[in-house]
Amino acid sequence: QKEVEQNSGPLSVPEGAIASLNCTYSDRGSQSFFWYRQYSGKSPELIMFIYSNGDKEDGRFTAQLNKASQYVSLLIRDSQPSDSATYLCAVSDGNNRLAFGKGNQVVVIP
Amino acid sequence: DVKVTQSSRYLVKRTGEKVFLECVQDMDHENMFWYRQDPGLGLRLIYFSYDVKMKEKGDIPEGYSVSREKKERFSLILESASTNQTSMYLCASSLKWLRDREQYFGPGTRLTVT
């Protein structure tokens, strides 16, 4: 079973700071990578996807992919209280399925 | 915008009851998925479907079955509900493409089995 690891515990960041989340994956052949945000009691919503090595920016979010090291990260710049949520990393298996990490909780402190 | 809807937000059933959870998507997606989400265990795939009348077991299919008679609709069936099936159930859909695409989730059904 393909594994996606999000090991760091809850992350507390002051408002306006950068939140950094990391994710490692086991399947070297994975081609597509996604970050989802999930508010408490709600369903996951897609915030970023990345297919190629390097950085991809979308507003205050930047996804970074390093296939050689098998990790993908998410940076949230100028963190806002509304960014307080659990962030899920998801990696494709090449057969239309996604493997999800267990998530990292982010708490932005005003 | 992709819209995935689920038949109920909250559901309370008794042990042994047959339970139907329905999911409908309006974006003509080929792939549909059923997950359950439990604290500390993350999202776990129960069943998925690539096409009408087609189904594949996910990681935890025991105690569940599915039905996909129309492209837009994917149903999850609990043949005889048990207390360990109390969970948040999430339906998702995605486009079948050359590269695996993002999945869009419905709002979820919180099922309690007493």
Image (cartoon, rainbow, N blue to C red):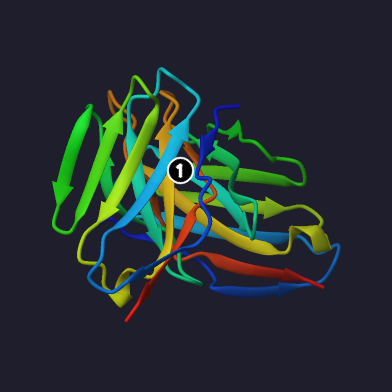
Label 1 crowding class (10 Å Cα cut-off): few <14, some 14-19, many 20+?
A: many
Residue A82 in picture, x, y percent from top left: 31, 74
Image position of A33 with respect to B85: above or below: above
Q: Looking at the picture, tell me which residue is in the foreground, A107 or A101.
A: A107
- Residue A76: image quadrant is bottom left
Image position of B38 with respect to B10: above or below: above
Residue A67 shows up from this direction: yes
Q: Chain of mark 1?
A: B
Q: Looking at the picture, tell me which residue is in the foreground, A29 or B114.
A: A29
Image position of A48 with respect to B48: above or below: below
Quadrant that contains the N terminus of chain B: bottom left
The number of discs equals 1
Instruction: Tell whether B107 sits left or right of B66.
Output: left
Residue A106 in picture, x, y percent from top left: 42, 64
Quadrant that contains the C terminus of chain B: bottom right
- Residue B55: image quadrant is top right
As drawn, the residue found furthest toward the right would be: B16
Q: What residue sits 40% from the left and 49% below the top?
A: B72
Residue A103 in picture, x, y percent from top left: 49, 52
Instruction: Tell whether A17 sits left or right of B88.
Output: left
Q: Which three-letter amino acid code belongs to the residue tagged 1? A: Met
Q: What residue sits 29% from the left and 28% below the top?
A: B97
Residue A37 in picture, x, y percent from top left: 37, 59
List the residue tagged with mark 1. B32
Residue B95 shows up from this direction: no
Element type at mark 1: strand
Q: Looking at the picture, tell me which residue is in the foreground, A43 or A76.
A: A76
- Residue A31: image quadrant is top left
Q: What residue sits 53% from the left and 45% below the top?
A: A7
